[in-house]
Image (tube, rainbow, N blue to C red):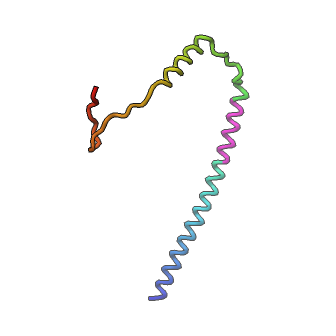
């Protein structure tokens, strides 16, 4: 009886050790893959920027700047209104 218990405990420890080793290996592999992906992405971005320079964009004209200012002014004035709810959490009619 005692030897079976010791054997079962040893099996559990062995399984946990195997799972820990697998998790460590998987983490290392994923880290390596993510680093490789990061390098490939950086190279791709550098290639796109080198082939298509972003400095050729014309500045906005006065009409575009005027519209941008109007939108910015109107967006800042909006406020969030929360609807009224009763004790049960249902929406209630707001009084005028």
Residue 94 at x, y percent in the picture: 28, 30
- Residue 75 is left or right of residue 51, and the answer is left
Query: In the image shown, does 36 or 57 lie closer to the viewer?
Result: 57
Q: Is residue 22 left or right of residue 51?
A: left
Residue nearest the observer in this picture, 58 or 9? 58
**Quadrant of the image for the C terminus?**
top left
Q: Position of residue 90 (x, y in %)?
A: 27, 39
**Residue 38: percent from left, percent from top:** 66, 43
Q: Residue at x 61, y 57 (%)?
A: 27
Image mark count: 0
In the picture shown, does residue 72 fall above or below 46?
above
Residue at horizontal 58 percent and vertical 11 percent from the top: 63
Looking at the image, residue 73 sits to the left or right of residue 41; the answer is left
Q: Residue at x 45, y 25 (%)?
A: 78
Q: Quadrant of the N terminus?
A: bottom left
User: Which quadrant of the figure has residue 39?
Assistant: top right
Asked if 54 appears above or below 36 in the picture, the reply is above
Query: Is residue 86 in the magenta section?
Result: no
- Give the extent of the magenta segment: 35-48
Residue 42 in magenta stretch:
yes
Residue at left offset 51%, top offset 77%: 11
Q: Main secondary structure of the magenta part?
A: helix
Q: Residue furthest front?
A: 96
**Percent coordinates x, y for residue 80 in the rendering:** 42, 31
């Amino acid at each position: 009886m005692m030897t079976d218990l010791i054997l079962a405990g040893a099996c559990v420890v062995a399984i946990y050790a195997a799972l820990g080793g697998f998790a460590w290996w998987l983490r290392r592999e994923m880290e390596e893959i993510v680093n490789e992906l990061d390098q490939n992405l950086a190279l791709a971005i550098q290639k796109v920027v080198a082939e298509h320079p972003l400095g050729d964009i014309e500045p906005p004209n006065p009409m575009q700047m005027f519209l941008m200012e109007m939108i910015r002014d109107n967006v800042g004035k909006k406020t969030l209104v929360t609807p009224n709810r009763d004790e049960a959490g249902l929406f209630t009619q707001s009084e005028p």
